[in-house]
Amino acid sequence: MASLNRVELIGNLGRDPEIRYTPGGTAVASFSLATSEKVKNKSGEWEIRTEWHNIVLYARLAEVAGEYLSKGKSVYLDGKLKTRKWQDRDGKDRYTTEIIGDKLLMLGSKNGSIPDGSDDQPSNNQAHEDIPHDDTDPF
């Protein structure tokens, strides 16, 4: 049976990207992204509800995000959901669901894309190949 794991978000960064590196040298960026929607509350009044998402980027996309993104910037993100297991200080299993980004566009810039300093932008298919698909925790 076919399945689909895809997430598309437009939102604002809640904090500057934090850049780390795996033991193999792959860059990993993590940051929070806020999305908001207008909904009616129980009394019939409109209010804004904000959802916070944990975002993780790998390889060149992580490096570019670290260089060009900062808290408050508006972006479009295309990616997939991934839940990872980790242990807290007491040895208890914990789970975190993150969005692993495959494509990122800055909104409000001249052409909408993040500059990377080169003229040979990878196609969407090539961008997917650059992302490590292992279960190791880069943190």
Image (spheres, rainbow, N blue to C red):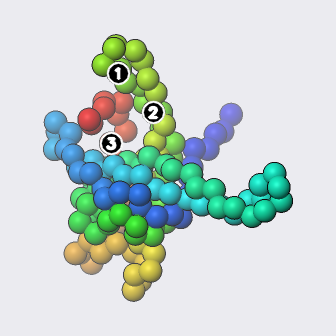
Residue 64 in picture, x, y percent from top left: 27, 64
Helix, strand or loop status at disc 3: loop
Q: Is residue 105 visible?
A: no
Q: Is residue 86 above or below residue 98?
A: above
Answer with left or right where residue 13 lies relative to residue 137. right
Q: Indicate the secondary structure of the residue bearing disc 1.
A: loop
Depth check, front residue: 70 or 42:
42
Mark 3 and mark 1 lie on one chain; the one further toward the N terminus is 1
The residue under label 1 is 88
**Tag 2: residue type?**
Thr
Q: Is residue 19 visible?
A: yes
Q: Position of residue 21 (x, y in %)?
A: 19, 44
On screen, residue 126 above or below 119: above
Crowding at label 2, few (<14), some or many (≥20) Cα neighbours within 10 Å?
few
Q: Looking at the picture, how far across and down is residue 109, in whole percent? A: 40, 81
Tell me: residue 124, above or below residue 101: below
> What amino acid does circle 1 point to?
Asp
- Residue sitting at x 74%, y 59%: 39
Residue in the image at 37% along x and 38% along y: 133
Quadrant that contains the C terminus: top left
Q: Nearer the viewer, mark 3 or mark 1?
A: 1
Front one among 75 and 58:
75
In front of the other: 110 or 37: 37
| Mark number, residue 132 | 3
- Determine whether the residue tagged by mark 2 lies in a helix, strand or loop: strand
The residue under the point 37% across, 24% down is 86
Q: Dividing the picture into quarters, in which one does residue 88 lie?
A: top left
Name the residue type under label 3: Pro
Disc 2 target residue = 96
